[in-house]
Image: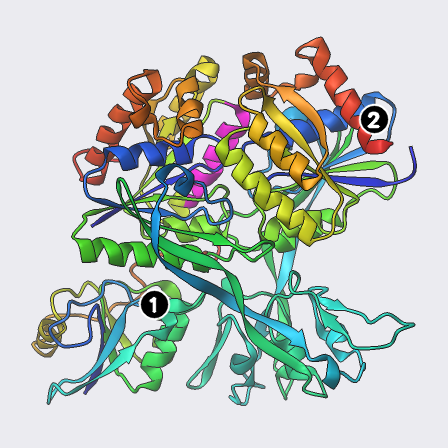
Amino acid sequence: MKELVIISGKGGTGKTSVTAGFAALADRAVLADCDVDAADLHLVLKPRTYKSEDFSGGKTARIVAERCTGCGTCAGVCRFGAVILPDPDAGGAYRIDPTACEGCKVCVEFCPAAAIAFEDTINGRWHIGQTRFGPLVYAELGVAEENSGKLVSLIRKEARALAVDKGCDLLIVDGSPGVGCPVIASIAGADLVLIVTEPTLSGRHDLGRVADLARHFGVPAAVCVNKADINPALSEQICSEAAERSLSVLASIPYDPQVTAAQVAGQTIIELGPGPAERVVRRLWEQTLDLLNGRMAAR
Amino acid sequence: MNGLRTIAVASGKGGTGKTTVATNLAVLLARQGHAVQYIDGDVEAPNGHIFLRPDITHSRCVTVPVPTVDSSRCTGCGRCGQICQFKAIVPVKSSVLTFEQLCHSCGGCLRVCPVQAIEEKPLDIGRVDIGRTDGPDFVQGTLRIGSVRSVALIRAVRTHAADRGVVILDAPPGTSCPVIAAVRGVDFVLLVTEPTPFGLHDLKLAAAMVRHLGLAHGVVINRSGLADEATEMFCRGEGIEILARIPDDRRIAETYSNGGLILDVAPNLGDIFSALARRLLA
Amino acid sequence: MKIAVTAQGPDLDAAVDPRFGRAAYFLLVDTETMDFSLMENEASQAAGGAGVSAAQAVIDAGAEAVLTGNCGPNAFRTLKAGGVSVYTGVSGTVREAIEGYVAGRFSPDAGANVQSHHGTEPQE
């Protein structure tokens, strides 16, 4: 079973549109949306959800008001500014701000009145649904919740188990933007990472960072340039820089209003019909498969 | 203009135009004579420098404290391992292992150690660069590749916020902890969106986040004209003001792609940003 | 002697799990009798430090060696501190793995054979 993860470094390069296109072209694949902070793949794939579960990423402290003596020890030991002081006029208990609480348990340990509970945080929910292209595992984090990568790891784990269970030999993962915990958790151990970039200075800058990240974690990577014709000179430059890093550029997708039209229609670029971008995405898919199956060297 | 305003520019979805709006707004305000500081809080992928081209005057390395154990004092009681929620300090047989990359720097282990065998040492997580342009002053954070401490770095970046004038804070995309660290306590959040189904879906998440944090907010629609109705309806329904609409124009995309400021692309873009500035600072 | 083997299923005919920290199960096997006890790997649910937690569980269970597909740097460090030898590159069924070990076909690793998964590797 091979795992392909599509990432971007910079947001908005078209990673989810490419992933959706691949879902339409793949034969017997499991799909996963690991961009849990802004999960969009399900909007196109429209899963019929058959399993949903709460997700707990850690624990949060909660002061039990009736037991609080107002000593302020918690505020003194908290390094995350999570303790809300009581109103000096009203008196009353200290409180923990759950959006700031790091879940370190130090206040719990040091409260002389044992007035602080330490409870599983429900950070979000994850789901498995059936789509017209196969099963999709996806999730959404709750508002203002920590995105440590644990939920991402859980989605990958469930998706892998599903692939094994259904005898699928491909897992296609829509990854997260950036280079932090969620991306690291998306790509670690993947067979191939496809970086979708765009010919802008920002895109080029972030391609560098995410390529470094993939190398840092020993994951083979390849590149595709989306909206390539909005700046042909920069597209060229990105391609030659990629070559210098021994990164294959598998395709350059032209800017095509059909990509947005497909999104608005709730379809993949492939389903909308033949077009400039659609043609290249089909070629990109073949190239990606070749790379995944060892018929070509990534670097 | 009345005193200090800290305006964060955020979005649920990446790539909607946060940095475009933040940098162009900062430049426009500076041109109008305000004291302006631009802070790039997207420490994983800071791009503001591409458009503002600052002269960096100084940089500082940012560290977080992680534990170091004096094994000659350690009695092997194991209390450090018991309190640590993150497996960053792990007593195993007769030694105590520390895993710096798992540490959240809470200080719990050193507090519980009965023999003061644990001290803290600094772990490099990235840097802050401070600089100047002809217009806004400039601050950016850059996370070390492989580090997971975005939140700590963003907090460090924000300590450099100016205490006068307008501060424009370019936030990371999304709605999770790094964004919270970037926008917490600001006077106003500008939510930049694009009128596509993905954009609207993620705008709803971002709006919920700023409401949750109790922050005043408004919307900027970038690439306006694509399919605005659904976005307009959402904002109307939630009572969220749309403060500016930037048109969907290939020239804007091209200018942006070359690292140019879009203020000067077409005459009306300057007006759009002036109007936005007026509504923000009124 | 007692050996821990990572497993994708709950018995000796299960395939060896290629992962350590996030392995589905550990089978703790007595190499002489082939009696075994089953450990569900609770660490597989951990946010970070799964490798460390899994290693602690294996050490606490009294294993002297671990047979697995791969082992990351945090798990390796912990196992080493706990005096547990690590053998990576092991595949096939758990039963076959034990037989291979007893026949002396494996040699112990000097370090982790894969990168860490969660940004938990020591920075360069």
Query: What residue do we see at 25% from left, 68% from top?
Result: C109
As shown in the figure, which amino acid type bears the numbered disc 2? Arg
Q: Chain of mark 2?
A: B
What label sits on residue B278 in the rendered view?
A: 2
Magenta span: A200-213
Q: Chain of mark 1?
A: C
Judged from the image, the secondary structure of the residue bearing numbered disc 2 is: helix
Number of residues whose C-alpha sits closer than 10 Å to that of mark 2, classed few (under 14), some (14–19) or many (20 or more)? few
* Residue identifier under label 1: C21
As shown in the figure, which amino acid type bears the numbered disc 1? Gly
Q: Is residue A257 above or below residue A113?
A: above
Query: What residue do we see at 65% from left, 25% from top?
Result: B51
Number of residues whose C-alpha sits closer than 10 Å to that of mark 1, classed few (under 14), some (14–19) or many (20 or more)? many
Residue A284 point in image, percent of width and height: 28, 27
What label sits on residue C8 in the rendered view?
A: none
- Viewer-closest of A70 and A148: A70
Do marks 2 and 1 share a chain? no
Q: Is residue A100 above or below residue C58?
A: above
